[in-house]
Image (spheres, rainbow, N blue to C red):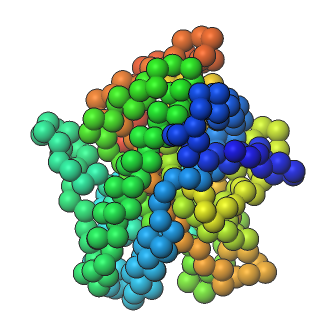
Amino acid sequence: MSDTTGTGPRIPTIDLRPWLDGEAETRRGIARTVDEALQTAGFLLVTGHGVDGELRDDLRKAARAFFTLPEEAKAAYAAKVGGRGWLGPGAEANGYSEGTATPPDLKESLTFATHEPFEDPATNAEWYAPNVWPVEVPQLRALCAVYLARMGELEKTLLELLGYALGVERNFFARHMSHPTYGFNINWYPGTAVVGDPEPGQFRIGPHTDFGTVTVLDRQAGRGGLQVYTDEGGWEDAPYDPAAFTINIGDLMARWTGDRWRSGRHRVLPPPADAPDEELLSLVYFGECTPGTVVESVPAPLGRVAYPPVDSHAYLREKLNSITVD
């Protein structure tokens, strides 16, 4: 366990191996570090996750093979925000979720989601649809299946750690994962030769917070990369470790904790003027919970704001609709 210090935001690196296998005092120390970090930036770096680096590299390679196809080939898989398939240029503006009228985000995405149908027909109609797999990249489906299985395991581990760090029972969050939904975006951030010069106020992803419980991000370092926001430092470059996942909590988790923990506000900078050809590709797993979960703020002294109870997926749907560019 280490702290990222210096001029950047205070985002610690947590090694999950001593959390899973260490002594009680070691686990308590990890929990204290997590609690303190989530009260400020809402971000962590996590190592010891056991997800193979080669799998991550192979998934990126397969996704890039899709993104570099001609646009008419990709258009066959076009989808809307919250759907399954290809989100092309101009489809999404994350700044809208904060009420900011920004230009559309400078990215393309392949988006996948929950793969197992639900028993309830209404829930099934709202939150389940078959994923769409591009025939041009046949290896993508198998790679995603392995990766998403690992993400589901990691998500449950993180939620148990968060329950412990909050000072409630360890399964406080994890018990709402009997049949969870999730979102998975593979985001492609090409250079200006593809997206053109950025407009004023335009980002690869505009300033926003995520909407769910925990987000697991596998990112690449770049000059036009991830920045996080804190009250103390404003916007600062996020620390980077190629072996680590970047973890941030979303709005539902912040509401659950009564704003003890911050929903991590962040953005991805546009292609830099001095490196206009920079290309980045991120794997983004958005953890959610089982539909029908009622998210209710923990009481004081743990919680600091008593939000009204909210249906998890009514909240998620409203937020997904808010970032859709008409």
Q: Is residue 180 above or below residue 6?
A: above
As drawn, which residue projects farthest toward the top?
A: 300
Whether residue 59 is visible to the viewer of this picture, yes or no, is yes
Decide if residue 288 is on the left or right side of residue 268.
Answer: left
Q: Which picture quadrant has residue 140?
A: bottom left
Quadrant in which the N terminus appears: top right
In percent of the image, x 48 and y 73: which residue is there? 54
Q: Is residue 171 above or below residue 183?
A: above
Q: How many marks?
A: 0
Q: Is residue 87 above or below residue 174?
A: below
Q: Which picture quadrant has residue 300?
A: top right
Q: Nearer the viewer, residue 261 or 32?
A: 32
Measured from the top left, where is residue 308 in percent x and y? 47, 18
Q: Nearer the viewer, residue 129 or 164?
A: 164
In percent of the image, x 78 and y 53: which residue is there? 236
Q: Is residue 164 above or below residue 186?
A: above
Whether residue 229 is visible to the viewer of this picture, yes or no, is no
Decide if residue 13 is on the left or right side of residue 140.
Answer: right
